Image (cartoon, helix red, strand yellow):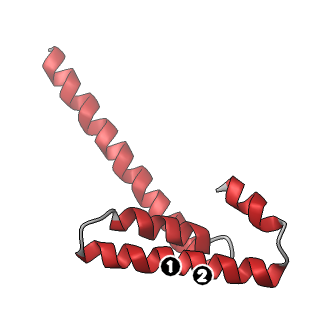
Amino acid sequence: MDKIKKWLSVLPHPIRWALTMFIGFVLLILGLIMMVTPGPGVLFIFFGLSILALEIEWARELNKQGMQGLQKIVAGLKAFWSNLFKRKNK
């Protein structure tokens, strides 16, 4: 994400905003389409929101909530697997 920010920071604000909106919404729409067709829909939605979060506050908030949810899921999986391995070693 930092590379994208750095690349976009060179552009004037109106062009940067338009490019960010275009790429973000295209990825978001592709992700929504891929939710009902074969493809990595959730991944594209996440990337689209991450790009939109560079310029839009609601996308930033959704991205933050998604990351917090992902952290909870990862923590739960880690706890599950560590408990599973502890039981096997007994």
On screen, residue 86 above or below 72: above
On screen, residue 31 above or below 88: below
Residue 27 rendering spot, x and y as whole percentages: 48, 73
Side (left or right) of 63 relative to 73 = right
Q: What element carries label 1?
A: helix
The residue where tag 1 is placed is 26
Asked if disc 2 and disc 1 are in contact, CB closer than 8 Å, the reply is: yes
Side (left or right) of 8 relative to 19 = right
Q: Which of 33 and 69 is in front in this view?
A: 33
For label 1, the crowd category at 10 Å Cα-Cα, with few meaning under 14, some 14 to 19 and many 20 or more, is some
* Badge 1 amino acid: Val
The residue where tag 2 is placed is 22
Write the residue at 77% across / 58% down: 6
Q: Which part of the image, by quadrant, shows the C terminus?
A: top left
On screen, residue 71 above or below 33: above
User: Residue 89, can we see it?
Assistant: yes
Write the residue at 82% across / 79% down: 13
